[in-house]
Amino acid sequence: MLIGAFAGVVGSYLTGSVWGGLLVAIVSTVLFAAIFAYFTVTIKADQTVIGTAMNILAVGLTTTINRAMFGSSTVTQIDTFDNIAIPVLSKIPVIGPAFFSHAFPVYLAFILVPIFGFVLFRMNIGLKIRAVGENPRAADTMGIKVNFIRFMTVLFSGLMAGIAGAYLSMGKMSFFTENMTSGVGFMALAAVVFGNYKPAGIMWASIIFGASTALMYRLQAMNIGVSNYFLLMLPYVITIIALCGFRRRSNQPAASTVPYIKE
């Protein structure tokens, strides 16, 4: 996401178009995801170690290039996503502006929820994806190319992270700051667990975590006399409490994070 946020700003700055920025963000994050896939899927390295290393690399890389290109100044002369008000619905009092007046990536996120649900649980490709996560050896005996499916899904995750990062810097904000994701990616992982690995559940978990972030900003604006450091912790505290209170049977794939070594 951090790579996508920075690449999006650079792309928008150089091309003068938010769509050019989005394309640069997607290409950059897919390439970054390919590195992760190479080490974890092809070489069979530990995913946690590689993931941690690449997170550190992303912070250092974006910081270094940002300072080399723009110095200490914040780039604001970029094209950004405009809010698209849905006719009629956006005029509904209170809920209209909150739900029906957003940038394109926000609508895309909600549209993709039922699409991904259908693909994962109703289509052959979804069956293959779930099979290589649950029982890769059995999937292999059925002729499914386990490592290829895993590699491609990691690339797809890079594509989605690119869109998310680009929206963060060119939609939610209109500039890039160093380490601007600041734990958002880990909250996304928490949303996957809390949403029980299902698109609809992940959507509701994301809404809850997003609401906690909005509450943080609202409380800061109200100046309620509570330390800002405590308010900054609020979204993460709510995330931890939600995960600790999670009691349902988890649908986590049995072979999650386990490299597949063909015998």
Image: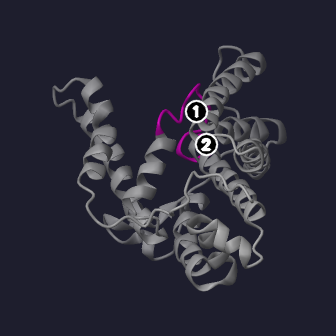
Pointer 1 and pointer 2: residues touching (CB < 8 Å)? Answer: no
From what the image shows, is residue 67 above or below residue 103? Answer: above
Q: Earlier in the sequence, mark 1 or mark 2?
A: 2
Judged by its main secondary structure, the magenta piece is loop
Question: Quadrant where the N terminus lies?
Answer: top right
**65 with respect to 137 (left or right):** right
Q: Nearer the viewer, residue 225 or 164?
A: 164
- State whether residue 78 appears in this view: no
**Mark 1, other Cα within 10 Å: few <14 / some 14–19 / many ≥20:** few
Residue at 31% x, 64% y is 94
Residue at 58% x, 27% y is 177
* The magenta stretch spans residue 182: yes
Q: Which mark is residue 47?
A: 2
Q: Point out the stretch of residues depicted in magenta.
A: 169-183
Identify the residue under disc 1. Answer: 52
- State whether residue 155 appears in this view: yes
